[in-house]
Amino acid sequence: MTERTLIVLRHAKSAWDTGEPDHLRPLAPRGLRDGVAAGRVLAGHDLDVVLCSTATRARMTWLRAERGGARCADVRFDGALYGADPADVIRLVRELPGTARTALVIGHEPTLAEFILDVAQPSDVTEHVAEKFPTAALAVLRFGGGWGQVTSRDVRLEDFEVPRGRVGADDD
């Protein structure tokens, strides 16, 4: 049985006072730093595919993650992740190519936490996700079989962390 890894990343901190519509809000200075910090974590994973919301803050999070060392040749921007519910995320994950072993989903709250709590076995780690899934938080899920098995309770939430960038580092 092939092991799959699904990494779920909430977009980094967005700016609120830009006057832009929600879909177009960019990252705040802290989000710029935290996106790079998330990329440093993601650099330790061999990503086969990235599914990213089309919202500006999500797209910018991926670009900042690349700056931090994240790499993937197959990056897909999907409008269905903006305004999605957990069932939409499940559908998108089930459509991932069978050749992909590790995938990253970049999206929004409260959808991502609800998705994780729907598919993962209850544990101490899922309790942290239930309490709060902050901006730039990363959750690493693992399970056997194909992407269609993501809906089973055999999914393990193995890691949950919130990378934070340092002020003055990678601010541009």
Image (cartoon, grey):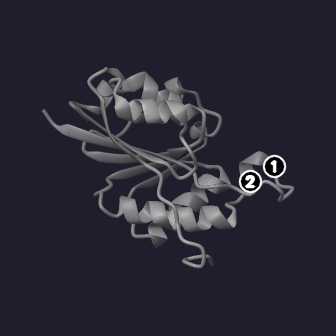
166 and 65: which is toward the camera: 166
Q: Is residue 170 left or right of residue 156?
A: right
Q: Residue furthest right?
A: 19
Q: Residue 145 location, x and y as percent?
A: 21, 30
Query: Could you tell me the amino acid type at mark 2?
Result: Leu
Say if residue 100 shows up in the picture: no
Rendered image quadrant of residue 20: bottom right
Q: Is residue 118 left or right of residue 101?
A: right
Helix, strand, or loop for circle 2? helix
Q: Residues within 10 Å of mark 1 (few under 14, many from 20)?
A: few
- Residue at position x 40%, y 31% in the image: 126
- Residue assigned mark 1: 21
Say if residue 129 shows up in the picture: yes
5, above or below 76, in the image = above
Q: Is residue 82 left or right of residue 35?
A: right
Q: Which corner quadrant holds the C terminus?
A: bottom right
- Tell me, yes or no, whether the two marked residues, 1 and 2, touch with CB atoms within 8 Å: yes
- Residue assigned mark 2: 24
- Residue at position x 55%, y 77% in the image: 170
Query: Could you tell me the amino acid type at mark 1?
Result: Pro
- Residue at position x 37%, y 51% in the image: 49
